[in-house]
Image (cartoon, grey):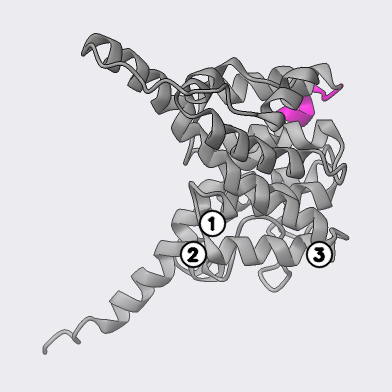
Amino acid sequence: MTPKDEFGKRDSKEPVPGPWDDALAQLREWDPNWAETCLEMTINPWTTGILPRKFVELVGVGLNAACTSLNPDGTRRHIRAALKAGATREEILMVLKMASVMSIHSCSLGAPVLLEEARAANVNPTKHSNNPATPACDKMRAVGQWNEAWDPFFELDPVWTDQFMATGLEIYGSGLMTPKMVELISIAFDASYTHMYAPGTRRHIKAALKLGATMEEIMEVLKLCVVQGVQACNMGVPILAEELNNLPPHSG
């Protein structure tokens, strides 16, 4: 844990683990009580020891780099911290790939709606001739990894769906992370406040529990999603400081 002084407050000169950047120093100057209270809450997942520091930072990379977030400052901060904690280039790259393909939820959400509304409008989807080969989808089904939520967009475009699944197979079949770690990171993606994809959150929590994850480990991941909220301060506090400095001086 970050050292505290004799009065119980954290030494502002010590590096702070967690989701904060230099905005914390300004926040401490403007509102020291709230800054310290919020700091204690936000660094909690870094100090409980329930999840290894490297894994915590990898989750931080994912939450910031996710296609639903795209926070360059946070991504850089957590990549640096993950490397310092022993993460490899390949592990971080895997998280970035996972952060990319979560965009499939656009189809998970939209394809069923498209089929329903098309039926209501008496519009029929194009029939696919010759049953195109879909080896990646077939493999997903064979190993029990097929998700029924993918059926609607497979029906609409089986070739493209297979191309996407081939991309996913390359990521998730790499063996760089244990299946449990993959599920925990997936929970973070789906439960993050920039996404809040309930079906995926439930699916990955169920899978994580089945793979031996504890309730405490999953709760730590959810906490990491929540503390990500201080990105509002990381972004806004420096802007506020700049705009205050740009105000014209008060006249006599």
Q: Quadrant of residue 232?
A: bottom left
Helix, strand or loop at label 2? It is helix
User: Which mark sits nearer the N-terminus, 1 or 3?
Assistant: 1
Q: Are discs 1 and 2 less than 8 Å apart at CB?
A: yes
Residue farthest bottom in this picture: 252
Residue farthest front in this picture: 130
Q: Amino acid at mark 1?
A: Ala
The residue singled out by tag 3 in the image is 83
Q: Residue at x 21, y 13 (%)?
A: 121
User: Which mark sits nearer the N-terminus, 1 or 2?
Assistant: 2
The crowd level at tag 3 (other Cα within 10 Å; few <14, some 14-19, many 20+) is some
> Considering depth in this image, is 98 or 154 the residue closer to the camera?
154
The answer to whether 166 is drawn above or below residue 11 in the figure is above
The residue singled out by tag 1 in the image is 35
Q: Quadrant of the C terminus?
A: bottom left
Helix, strand or loop at label 1? It is helix
Helix, strand or loop at label 3? It is helix
Q: Is residue 231 left or right of residue 134?
A: left
Q: Is residue 73 left or right of residue 215?
A: left
- Residue 197 locus on image (x, y percent): 51, 28
Q: What is the spatial separation of the Cα atoms under label 1 and label 2, in whole angstroms?
A: 6 Å
- Residue 130 locus on image (x, y percent): 55, 23
Q: Which residues are magenta?
A: 212-218
Q: What is the spatial separation of the Cα atoms under label 1 and label 3, in whole angstroms?
A: 27 Å
Q: Residue at x 87, y 36 (%)?
A: 178
Q: Residue at x 87, y 42 (%)?
A: 175
Q: Are discs 3 and 2 less than 8 Å apart at CB?
A: no
- Residue 129 locus on image (x, y percent): 49, 23
- Residue 177 locus on image (x, y percent): 85, 42
Residue 16 visible in the picture: no
Q: Is residue 230 left or right of residue 79?
A: left
